[in-house]
């Protein structure tokens, strides 16, 4: 199955896709780095619509390296 929310690229394609996903779901599982943007907006929309929202926080801190 393939679903398309836009026939061609426009600046609102991702927002329309995210709105469609929320409208056609009962649960949202998001991998989130804490920044405001599309994922943030989708999480907020899903919560407002009463979806079961689960967030997996992405750790973006630099990792220490060893010189062995």
Image (cartoon, rainbow, N blue to C red):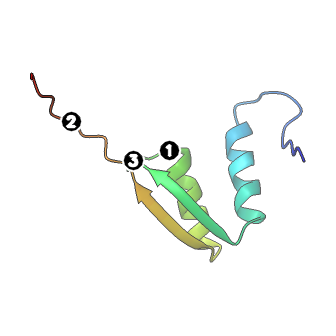
Q: Which residue is mark 2?
A: 63
Relative to residue 39, is residue 26 depicted above or below? Answer: below
Earlier residue among tags 1 and 2: 1
Q: Which residue is mark 1?
A: 37
Q: Position of residue 19 (x, y in %)?
A: 71, 55
Q: Position of residue 35 (x, y in %)?
A: 40, 46
Residue found at x 89% / y 33%: 7
Horizontal relation, residue 24 to residue 48: left or right: right
The image's mark for residue 3 is none
Query: Crowdedness of circle 1 by 10 Å Cα count: few (<14), some, many (20+)?
Result: few
Mark 3 and mark 2: span between their CA atoms? 16 Å
Horizontal relation, residue 4 to residue 50: left or right: right
Q: State if disc 3 and disc 1 touch (CB < 8 Å).
A: no
Q: Position of residue 51 (x, y in %)?
A: 63, 74
Q: Position of residue 21 (x, y in %)?
A: 73, 57
Query: Crowdedness of circle 3 by 10 Å Cα count: few (<14), some, many (20+)?
Result: some
Q: Which residue is mark 3?
A: 33
Closer mark to the observer between disc 1 and disc 2? 2
């Amino acid at each position: 199955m393939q679903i398309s929310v836009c026939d061609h690229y426009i600046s609102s394609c991702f927002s329309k896709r995210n709105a469609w996903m929320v409208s056609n779901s009962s649960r949202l599982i998001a991998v989130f780095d804490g920044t405001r943007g599309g994922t943030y907006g989708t999480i907020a929309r899903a919560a407002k619509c009463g979806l079961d929202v689960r967030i997996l926080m992405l750790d973006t801190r630099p990792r220490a390296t060893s010189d062995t």
